Image: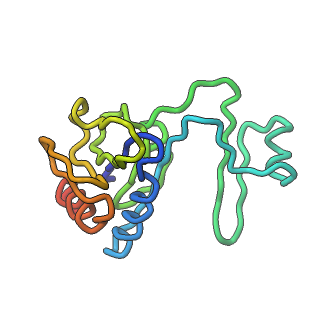
Amino acid sequence: MKLYGVTGWKNNGKTGLMERLVAEFTARGLTVSTLKHAHHATDVDQPGTDSFRHRTAGAAEVVLASPNRVAIMQELRGAAEPSLTDLLARMRPVDLILIEGFKREPHPKIEAHRTEAGKPLIAPDDPTIRAVASDTPLTLDRPVFDLDDTKGVADFIAVELGL
């Protein structure tokens, strides 16, 4: 499976870029999965649902299945967070996995950057960032795309990965 990341600081456009890239690559006929890292407590389950009740009762893993989707929730209960490698090993094979976050991991990435967010660029100190998608022109030692140039960013990633 081919991997490519979208990284950057909070509120810099990562999720929007990811969403547009998934749509672009699937429109090109590729199968795409995503993997998102969250630094905060995240819960996709809601209080009161049966699956929530199962987890809070102590289940280590709850699988929720329906005709439309399957959700697997695994409680770490004090265990270490799984590594990116471990998480990728759990995923079904597809043409491309787009990874949001995981900025310290060594896979190739594009950095999303918005000037108004007021955060410095990560790219100058990180060789795994192969390009930047920004809302303002930048002069860097690697390609810079307009943050809204989804086709250009997707073309760049496709060439990088030989897709």
Left or right position of 71 against 24 = right
Position of 40 relative to 53 (above/below): above
Q: Position of residue 6 (x, y in %)?
A: 36, 48
Residue 5 in view in this figure: no
Closest to the observer, 3 or 137: 137
Q: Quadrant of residue 26?
A: bottom left
**Residue 130 occupies which quadrant of the picture?**
top left
Residue drawn at the location 42% of the way across and 40% of the way down = 9
Q: Where residue 103 sits: x, y (%)? A: 38, 36
Residue 94 appearing in the image: yes
For the rendered model, the colour scheme is rainbow
In the image, residue 92 lies at what x, y percent?
A: 47, 55
| Residue 124 to residue 49: above or below | above
Q: Position of residue 108 (x, y in %)?
A: 27, 43
* Residue pictured at 68% horizontal, 71% vertical: 67
Q: Residue furthest left?
A: 141
Q: Nearer the viewer, residue 147 or 128?
A: 147
Q: Quadrant of the C terminus?
A: bottom left
Instruction: Say left or right for 141 vs 163.
Output: left
Is 46 on the left-hand or right-hand side of 40? right
Q: How many marks?
A: 0
Residue drawn at x 71%, y 52% as measured from the top left:
63
Nearer the observer, 28 or 112:
112
What residue is shown at x 41% (from left), y 48% (from top)? 12
